[in-house]
Image (spheres, rainbow, N blue to C red):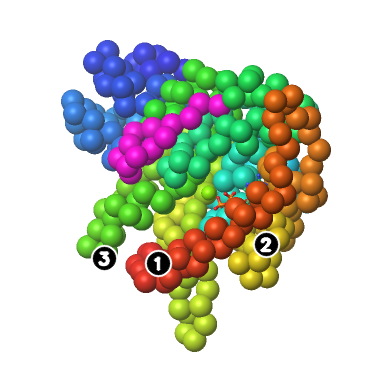
Amino acid sequence: MELSELSSIKPRQIKLLQENGITDIKSLSMSVPRDLEDIEGISGKASTKLIWDARDVMGMSSFKQVSEIEENYDFLKTGSERFDDILNGGVSTGRLTEVFGSFKSGKTNLAHTLAITCQMPIDEGGLDGAVLYIDTENTFSKSKIERIARRFGMEPKKALANIYHARIYSTDHQFQMIRAADQAVIEKNARLIVVDSLMALMRSEYVGIGMLASRQQVLNKMLHELSRIAETHNVAVLLTNQVATFMKGSYSANDAIGGNIVAHGCHFRIQFKTKGFSANTSLERTAIIVDAPDLAPEVASFFITEAGISDTEKVEYLLDEEEEKVPVKKITKKKKSSKKKAVATKSAELSDPLESL
Ligand SMILES: Nc1ncnc2c1ncn2[C@@H]1O[C@H](COP(=O)(O)OP(=O)(O)O)[C@@H](O)[C@H]1O
Ligand SMILES: [Mg+2]
């Protein structure tokens, strides 16, 4: 429903709301007055009135009989059937899914695989839509996307044209693009938003206890906005997150960073783990449902392959004529360098006890 259908709204307010990513009555109804407070030209009083009026129009200001509630979630397949099974069909639309895990645990590989499966028809486990990819770590790879597209029988060029990518340089930029996603979802017919990764920039920009409150405030705003977009447009949202190592009594444990805000802000929380010691060379990974409203805390194993995540160690796909098959030697070399890096991150992670907050 168009904002102009709201009887109390002024044309100037419509313009201001649209400029700030609130494009229709539904998204206004899911906002909170605080969201609009930052908009110059809309007073605190006016924002509450606008939002409450929008909720009236949407039928949100009265209690509903539960039998009338519609649940129309779709599920996006991950590339691994075992992983889909524990997710009850795949990554859900309408809600936020957080995947956390240590360096090289497979988060970015999952994001790439979903960017392809999302484009497949619904009856083949896809969402029949485009993808918005918010990349804060510069780890997006076109060639990986092309291989995954071939694996799923898709024309690589077409698949690439359906992924809209934003390379992000600061937390503020990240928030700007999350806001912009509301409109972009409609324009591009997107059904998946990836944020890879959620906390990487915040972790470096907001350092120390003095900055904790403002970091959590920004984080809260981002999650709230993403949640609203997910629900309004019934899109899937994948957030990846890093872990930090904490001392818990006499032993150490890995936990996602971002603390309670992330933990409570995401509907599905999944942990990815490397098997055995993190420095081993196996590409087998485990996915654990850590928290979900209606899923058992189950575990599934999958593999990272050169063409996305899968149930098997190798996947078959057609090669482009000019493209050479990646020699095994090259992969081994890669693993060695990531080993060193993994050790380096671990000690860095250990040094900041604030990360858990
Ligand atoms: N082409 C490939 N073939 C096989 N394994 C790969 C390939 N590319 C990356 N990997 C493996 O994937 C892992 C990195 O996964 P990634 O999804 O980037 O992790 P994260 O985002 O959790 O840090 C590394 O162990 C790397 O060896
Ligand atoms: Mg990554």
The answer for how far apart the CA atoms under marks 2 and 1 are is: 22 Å
Quarter of the rendering containing residue 37: top left
217 to 60, vertically: above or below: below
**SS of the residue under disc 1:** helix
| Stretch in magenta | 163-177
Amino acid type indicated by mark 1:
Ala
- Left or right placement of residue 353 versus residue 125 in this view: left
Residue 87 position in % (x across, y down): 70, 49
Give the residue at mark 1. Answer: 348
Residue 291 position in % (x across, y down): 60, 58
Depth order, front residue of 282/4: 282
Depth order, front residue of 89/134: 134
The answer to whether the residue bearing label 1 lies less than 8 angstroms from the nearest atom of ligand 1 is no
- Left or right placement of residue 141 versus residue 319 in this view: left
Give the residue at mark 3. Answer: 209
**SS of the residue under disc 3:** helix
Residue 301 position in % (x across, y down): 74, 57
Amino acid type indicated by mark 2:
Thr
| Residue at the image position 18 percent from the left and 25 percent from the top | 41
